[in-house]
Amino acid sequence: MGRALHFPLTGTARGIRKATHAHGAGESGLGKLIELHAVNGAGDVMITVALASTVFFSVPTDEARGRVALYLAITMAPFTLLAPVIGPLLDRIPHGRRAAMAGAMLARAFLALLLSSAVVTGGIELYPAALGVLVASRAYGVVRSAVVPRLLPPTFSLVKANSRVTLGGLLATGVAAPIGAGLQVLGPRYPLYGAFAIFIAGTFLSFTLPHKVDSAKGEDRALLAADEEHLHGPQLIKKKVRRPGLRTVGTAVTHALGANASLRCLSGFLIFFLAFLLREHPLTGESAAVSLGIVGVSAGAGNALGTAVGAWLKQRAPEIIIVTVVALVLGTAIIAALFFGAALVACLAAVAGFAQALAKLSLDALIQRDVPELVRTSAFARSETLLQMAWVIGGGIGIVLPLNGTLGLSVAAAIVAAGWLTTVRGLLSSARHGGAARPRVA
């Protein structure tokens, strides 16, 4: 009887472990990173559920817009100033990556406890605590990007490894979101208690990663020098360039980063604009909550599909993939703006999620192909920071825009068009010339 009652838990755990450790991921340590990222995604969605219910759903629409705008101003604005500092700061602790990831988990655990009282009282401490969660989450994301190249199985490319890690986080988010919603029914504190427990588990799980995660062998920082003599190697020390950046990684990477920034800006815009639009004007025949759920599920499904397709397209030209998916989003946004309706809104959310995932994986592939090994992890850190800043800008636009569907989706199309038109020529030119193969990280 004991074994029978115990089997659902142990059987599920064995199944998850078998999936995450398949194809050499267990031996390399990538499987443990996949599990850690799943824990990270589950904890983040618990906090998101609690904050969304407090800041957005609990008050009338006009007041909610003011609250969310205040939330962005107090949390996101300082974050945009802190974000560029995170990458260079973490570059200075390459031998403490496991401790950095554990610290990010532990910080969010205790901030979740602080938020558990703030969501009930509505105290001002909600905003600095939310800012702390954002900073800790981004710090974790930067370190995770730097860790992945150290845990590649022999048969994996970097794009496939990132696809596996991202998909693990998405699946965990999909499982944790309804659990968080159920806990929210019991009270606004309970999703945050759940987040506390999850992040405490993540703190201990961080230290189960292999010791080679803390190795900095062969690494250095990307430099703000556009000429070839400053690219990498001993010249990094000789020239003593002070400010790290992304301009040494080649035009393909910078154009791909620009295209990805437009998609990330679109993501932030759609999240906030559609949240308020559908609350005030739900989809035909549906409540506001159901309307938001339909759009959210569409975006999540598109994101998961893009992540899965990314592994299959790993040998295709990344530049062509980015140009194609951004053009697909642009066309969908134009159609949705011209013929605004429930089905097209859901379709745009799905296509945007699909394109964002696939374009990000293609950007990762370009960094792997074109960035010298010495500066590859630094390039990952800085690209993540710039993409997060683009999301903040898009979210701010979505907050202030009038609640008009055609106008909003026209702005969405303009955001994507700006990114596509400014990068398409450079990406196609890079695809024609190709990129030199780079050695894998040891």
Image (cartoon, rainbow, N blue to C red):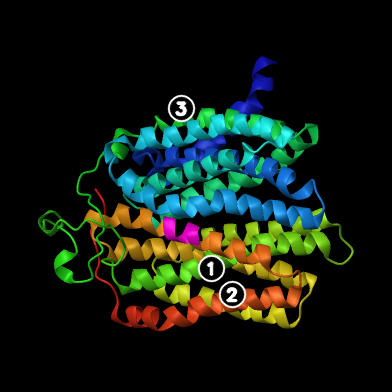
**Circle 3: is it few (<14), some (14-19), or many (20+) Cα within 10 Å?**
some
What's the magenta region?
A: 385-389
> Foreground residue, 379 or 389?
389
Residue 169 x/y as whole percent:
54, 46
Badge 2: residue crowd in 10 Å (few <14, some 14–19, many ≥20) = many
Label 3: element kind? helix
Could you say which is closer to the camera, residue 291 or residue 30? Answer: 291
Count of numbered marks: 3
Write down the residue under mark 3: 204
Q: Indicate left or right for 189 with 229 as reference.
A: right
Label 2: element kind: helix
Q: Which residue is mark 1?
A: 263
Circle 1: element type:
helix
In space, the residues marked 2 and 3 are separated at their CA atoms by: 40 Å
Residue at x 46%, y 36% (from the top left corner): 104
Q: Are marks 1 and 2 in contact (CB under 8 Å)?
A: yes
* Camera-nearest residue between 105 and 88: 88
Residue 58: x and y in percent read 79, 45
* First-in-chain label (1 vs 2): 1
